[in-house]
Image (cartoon, rainbow, N blue to C red):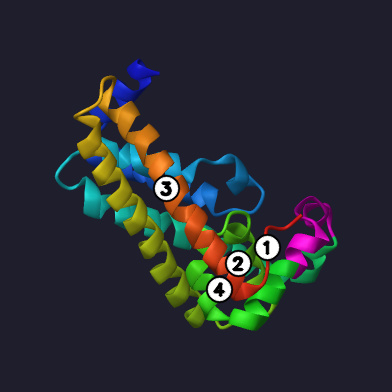
């Protein structure tokens, strides 16, 4: 692992950010996104510690997320009901799909804004938004602000973790990622509890 992380740190910034954007695109796709560690990828990019990495990381995250979510939105708009009753819909689960629609009906664009902070729903809400015929302009504006807020949170956590990494033993990049994930878990746990209290919808079963 340390050798792989060292190779990551040696990548040109443009290539590193392009890879981050692709990871975030995959993270935004239903089903596939569950398997992609988007938060780890952001912390790794921040942990490299280059002067331009901060702004570039936010741009790469927003671009990747918006691309993936827009594709999901388009799929929902064109194939919504067919997808819902297909094998893909079976894998997603009717309960999850119905919960995503309930969130959008009750909160509209506000739920798209907070979608990045909701595991599983972050990939389902764009699909449901397209199926429910939400305006794409409204969707993409809310999604952009949500992605920027999510990226900004991890950028702040990664920067704080990188500062702490200098005080701890071990590979600085690895320590940054580990501490960042711990801090993110604590912050997002409280955030998700408040969001569930506001929306009245818990984790899908």
- Tag shown at residue 202: 1
Category of crowding for the residue at label 1, using alpha-carbon neighbours closer than 10 angstroms: few (below 14), some (14–19), many (at least 20):
few
Q: Residue shown at 34%/27% (left/top)?
A: 174
Q: Secondary structure at mark 1?
A: loop
Residues at marks 4 and 2, CA–CA distance in whole angstroms: 11 Å
Tell me the magenta residue range.
86-98
Work out whether mark 1 precedes mark 4 in sequence or the reverse, and give the earlier one: 4
Judging depth in this view, the residue of 50 and 167 nearest the camera is 167
Work out whether mark 4 precedes mark 2 in sequence or the reverse, and give the earlier one: 4
Looking at the picture, how far across and down is residue 159, in whole percent? 24, 45
Q: Residue shown at 54%/54% (left/top)?
A: 28
- Tag shown at residue 196: 2
Question: Which one is closest to the eye, mark 1 or mark 4?
Answer: 1
Work out whether mark 2 precedes mark 3 in sequence or the reverse, and give the earlier one: 3
Judging depth in this view, the residue of 189 and 55 nearest the camera is 189
Q: Are marks 3 and 4 in contact (CB under 8 Å)?
A: no
Q: Are marks 1 and 2 in contact (CB under 8 Å)?
A: yes
- Tag shown at residue 111: 4
């Amino acid at each position: 692992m340390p050798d792989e992380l060292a190779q990551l740190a040696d990548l040109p910034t443009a290539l590193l950010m392009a890879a981050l954007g692709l990871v975030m695109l995959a993270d935004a796709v239903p089903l596939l996104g569950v398997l992609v560690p988007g938060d780890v990828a952001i912390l790794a990019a921040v942990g490299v510690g280059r002067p331009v990495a901060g702004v570039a990381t936010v741009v790469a995250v927003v671009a990747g997320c918006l691309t993936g979510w827009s594709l999901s939105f388009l799929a929902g708009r064109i194939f919504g009901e067919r997808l819902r009753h297909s094998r893909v819909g079976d894998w997603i689960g009717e309960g999850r799909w119905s919960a995503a629609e309930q969130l959008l009906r009750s909160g509209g664009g506000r739920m798209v804004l907070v979608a990045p902070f909701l595991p599983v729903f972050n990939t389902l809400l764009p699909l449901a938004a397209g199926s429910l015929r939400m305006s794409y302009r409204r969707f993409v504006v809310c999604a952009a602000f949500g992605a920027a807020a999510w990226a900004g949170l991890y950028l702040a956590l990664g920067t704080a973790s990188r500062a702490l990494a200098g005080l701890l033993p071990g590979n600085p990049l690895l320590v940054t990622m580990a501490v960042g994930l711990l801090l993110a878990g604590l912050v997002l746990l409280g955030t998700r509890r408040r969001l569930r209290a506001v929306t009245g919808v818990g984790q899908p079963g």
